[in-house]
Image: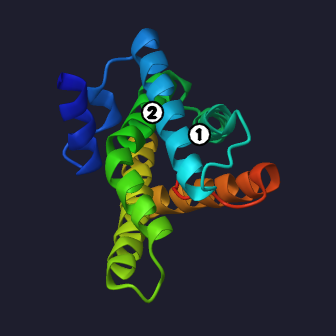
Amino acid sequence: MLLIRLLFDIAIWRRTPRDLPSSGPLLVAVMLAYIAQSTGQAAIASQGNLQGLDGVVDLVLTCAIYTAVVVVGGRTHRLAQTLLALLGTEVLLSPLTLALAAGVSATTPADPLGLVARVGLIGVLIWNVLIVAHVMRSVFESTLATGVLVAVACALLAYGFSDLWFGSTPATGG
């Protein structure tokens, strides 16, 4: 329960990844939860047409991008906490993301509920980018502008690689 509270506080910018424990087993548990939520999002986005390892590929891709950013930035001592914060907040947001993605899939753009779901999903995507910006600003002890630039660059890399692997971009920012 404490982890959920810490992740929620990171998501609303009250805390930073430094407040999280640097724990390998905890990171593995969050990675498994990330695979589950990523697979769920892929199932909704592809209407059940999964390629088998979508969640695992998403996790590897996400971790590779963020690891490269943290290593290039010379902050390897913060890697476990950074990954825990980024993956954990994504998992925390996943019930909302999954519900909105299901709403988008089940409706047409002309349907008022479909519009609400689409606007909500865009809001969650923007919130996710801002969470990544907050985490990166904290990790690099820099400005919010730097965090936003890093977050947007990571999102664009993830979308590009996802498009190459899956043939279409994922429904989330992770």
Residue 82 numbered tag: 2
- Determine the residue located farthest toward the right in the rendered image: 164
* Left or right for 17, reference 24: left
Quadrant of res 126 = bottom left
How many numbered tags mark residues here?
2
Give the residue at mark 1. Answer: 66
Task: Tell me if residue 143 can be seen.
Answer: no
Instruction: Name the kind of residue labelled 2 in the image.
Output: Thr
* Residue placed most toward the observer, 114 or 145: 114
Instruction: Name the kind of residue labelled 1 in the image.
Output: Tyr
Coordinates of residue 18 in the picture (x, y in percent): 32, 29
* Residue placed most toward the observer, 88 or 16: 88
How packed mark 1 is, by other alpha carbons closer than 10 Å (few <14, some 14-19, many 20 or more), is many
Q: Residue at x 68, y 44 (%)?
A: 50
Coordinates of residue 10 in the picture (x, y in percent): 27, 42
Coordinates of residue 28 in the picture (x, y in percent): 49, 17
Q: Residue at x 50, y 66 (%)?
A: 105
Mark closer to the chain start, 2 or 1 = 1
Q: Distance from label 2 to label 1 (Cα)?
A: 8 Å
